[in-house]
Image: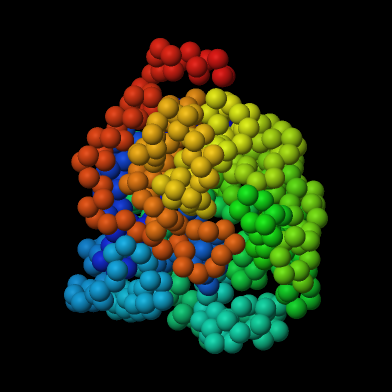
Amino acid sequence: MRFKRAAGVLLHPTSLPSRYGIGDFGQSAYRFVDFLIESKQALWQTLPLGPTGYGDSPYQCFSAFAGNPLLISPDRLVEEGYLPATAVTTVPPFPNHQVEYGPVITYKMNLLRQAFTHFQSYGTPEQQAALAEFAQEQAYWLDDYTLFMALKNEYMHHEGGVWNTWPIEIALRQPKAIAEWGNKLAEEVALHKFLQFLFFKQWLELKGYANIRGIQIIGDIPIFVALDSADVWANPDLFFLDDTGQPTVIAGVPPDYFSETGQRWGNPLYRWDRMAVDGYAWWEKRLDMSFVQADIVRIDHFRGFDAYWEIPVGEPTAVVGRWVQGPGAQFFRTLQEKLGELPLIAEDLGVITPEVETLRDEFNFPGMKILQFGFGGEQNSNFLPHNFDRNCVVYTGTHDNETTVGWYLNASSYEQDHVRRYMAVNGHDIAWDMIRLAHSSVANTAVIPLQDLLSLGNEARMNFPGKVGGYWRWRYRTDALSDHLVYRLREITELYGRAPGQQLTGKVEAIVAEKA
C-alpha cells in the first residue's frame, strides 16, 4: 500500500512525561499530539504496545493482543471516577528523564489494583456494562490472556513464572485443571480483564483524538511472539515445541551490522504448515487487532515471511543456524482476501535478498531506509537518498540505533567526512542536517525519532540490539516541546512538501516524477 507524502515522529508512549515514573495516556500524550499538529506532522509512530516482562522490551510481550497496563493514566482514572483522588495525592519522586522499571511497576500495579477495588464497590452501571461488553467482544484472546497472567502471578516465584515450568496439568492446559484454576483465580482474572478494558479505553480515546485531527498512528508488531506468552501457552500446536512446552528451535538473525555473533532472540518458531490449514486464522485475528490499535502497522523482521533464521535451541549464539523457507506471498494473499488492503510497513533491514524484495514489492509494502546506514560505503548504497524510490519510509535512525548525534560522534573520520561532503555541511548541527536530508528525499514517508529532533546524544538511546537491561528507559522532559522546536519542524516539513494538504511543486515534483 503506497502512502501519500507525509512526515511523522517516532516516540514510544513510555517516553512521555508523567509524574508516575513512566509515560502514559494522560495529558502529556494529548499535548504530544497537539505538538504533532502544530508542527504539521501527520504520523505518530510507536513501538509495540503490549505488556512487557523481563528486560522490559516491547518486542517480548506476554500477549500479541493485550496492552501494557503501565501505560494507563492514573490521572484519567481519577477524572473518570475509577480511582479516588486521595490515591494519587502522594507520588514517589521518580526520575523525570528515564523509567526505573522496578519501582514503577511496584507502585503503578498497586495503584491499578486500588482502582479495581474501587471499581468493584463504586463502578457505575454504565461502567460495569462497558466492561462486560468489552470482555464479551474480546473473549477470543482475553480469556486466555487473563488466566495466563493470573497463573503467572500465582507462580511468579517458581522459576520466574514461565508457563512451561507450571504444574504439567496447567502447562498443558488439561480442561479440568483450567476450569479449576479459573475458578480459584477468578478475582485475579477479573483484575486483568479490568486493566485491559482501561488500556483500550484510554488508548482508543487518545487515538481518536489524534485521528480526528489528522494524525495517523503507526503501530509496530514483531513477527515472532515470546515463549512466555499467552499466545504460545494457548496455541502450542502452532509452534515448534516438545512435549514439555520447551522450544526445539528458536528465532534470531545471523551476524550482521549490529552484532558479530548475530542475535539469539529465543522466540519459538511458527509451524507455518499448521497455520496454513485454517487460512492463518491466528494471524488474521492478530492483524485485525493491530489495525484496531493503529492505522498503519510496521512488521518487524519482515524478511522472516520469505525465509527465517532457525537456531537449534542449545546454541549459545546465533552463529550456528540455517535459513528456512517462510510462508511467502500466499500468506499475504490469504490475509488480503480476508482483511482487505493491508496498510503495512515492511521492516526490511539486515540480510535482504532479491526474494525478500520481490515479496515486499508484490504487495506494494513500503520498506525502510535508515540514513545512518548509508555512509562510509559505496555510492550505490540503498540507504543513500539518491538511490531511493518513492515507496519507502526514511528514518534518520530507529529505536535500535544510536541517536544521530551519538552515531556521528562515534563514526570513523572517513564516515564523518562522507556525511559532511554528501550534505555540504560542517557537522555542527548534524541531527538537523540529517532530518533535512530525510525530509528532502523522495521517500513518501519521513519519520524522525524525537531524540533527533532534540539533538540528543546516546544518553537518550532507546535500545541496543542483543543487550538486556538498561534500555527502553529514555523519557523527555516537559519543557522539551518548545515553540522553537514546533517552528523549526514545521518549517522543514512545509519546505519539502510534507505538510498535510500540500501539493508538490517545482524541483521536488520533478524529482518525484523521475523516481516514480
The residue lying at 73 percent from left, 58 percent from top is: 270
Q: Quadrant of residue 5?
A: top left
The residue lying at 80 percent from left, 55 percent from top is: 322
Quadrant for the C terminus in the image: top right
- 373 is higher (above) or lower (below) than 289: above
Q: Position of residue 19 (x, y in %)?
A: 26, 66
- 436 is higher (above) or lower (below) than 247: above
The residue lying at 71 percent from left, 33 percent from top is: 358
Can the viewer see residue 181?
no
Q: Quadrant of residue 360?
A: top right
- 423 is higher (above) or lower (below) than 398: above
For this rendering, which residue is in front, 445 or 414?
A: 414
For this rendering, which residue is in front, 171 or 261?
A: 261
Q: Is residue 471 left or right of residue 178?
A: left
Q: Quadrant of residue 181?
A: bottom right
Q: Please count the marks in the image.
A: 0
Toward the front, the furthest residue is 413
Quadrant for the N terminus in the image: top right
Q: Position of residue 120 (x, y in %)?
A: 33, 77
Q: Position of residue 370 (x, y in %)?
A: 53, 40
For this rendering, which residue is in front, 127 or 12?
A: 12
Q: Is residue 87 left or right of residue 437?
A: left
